[in-house]
Amino acid sequence: MNTKGKPHSSIVETDSAISRKQIKTIVVFTFCVILAAFTLWGAMYSSEGYVVKSVFGVTSVVAFLQALIQLSNVQVKEEKE
């Protein structure tokens, strides 16, 4: 705190920056889950051939793994606080 009893501005900025990072992480997690669902649906119901199905399948796996990473990032940040 400064001499007038108000919190220092860098502390307030840090708190808002942390919440923005958490919101960003949650948005990316949600996007990854949606992407994984759509690509998995495309891999299961596509009639284009094995190449397209494999691209959808690989994309689905990568999106799912990225969602797991984002989820673990949110949990680690909450434990630190």
Image (tube, rainbow, N blue to C red):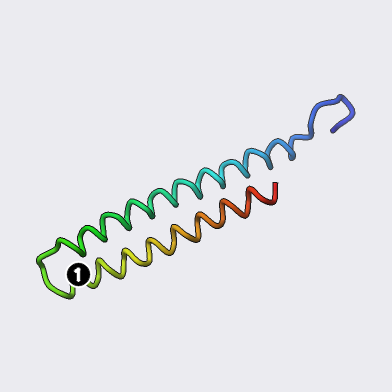
Q: In which quarter of the image is residue 35?
A: bottom left
* Farthest top residue in view: 4
> Which residue appears at 38% of the width and 66% of the height?
62
- Relative to 47, residue 80 above or below: above
- Judging by the rendered image, the residue that carries numbered circle 1 is 53
Number of numbered callouts drawn: 1
Secondary structure beneath dot 1 equals: helix
Left or right: 42 as drawn, with respect to 72: left
Residue 11 coordinates in the image, percent (x, y) = 74, 39
Q: Quadrant of residue 37?
A: bottom left
* Farthest bottom residue in view: 50
> Which residue appears at 25% of the width and 66% of the height?
56
Residue 29 coordinates in the image, percent (x, y) = 44, 52
Kind of residue sitting beneath label 1: Lys
Residue 79 coordinates in the image, percent (x, y) = 66, 50
Dot 1, how many residues are within 10 Å of its Cα: few (below 14), some (14-19), or many (20+)? many
* Farthest right residue in view: 3
> Which residue appears at 67% of the width and 39% of the height?
15
72 and 4: which is toward the camera: 72
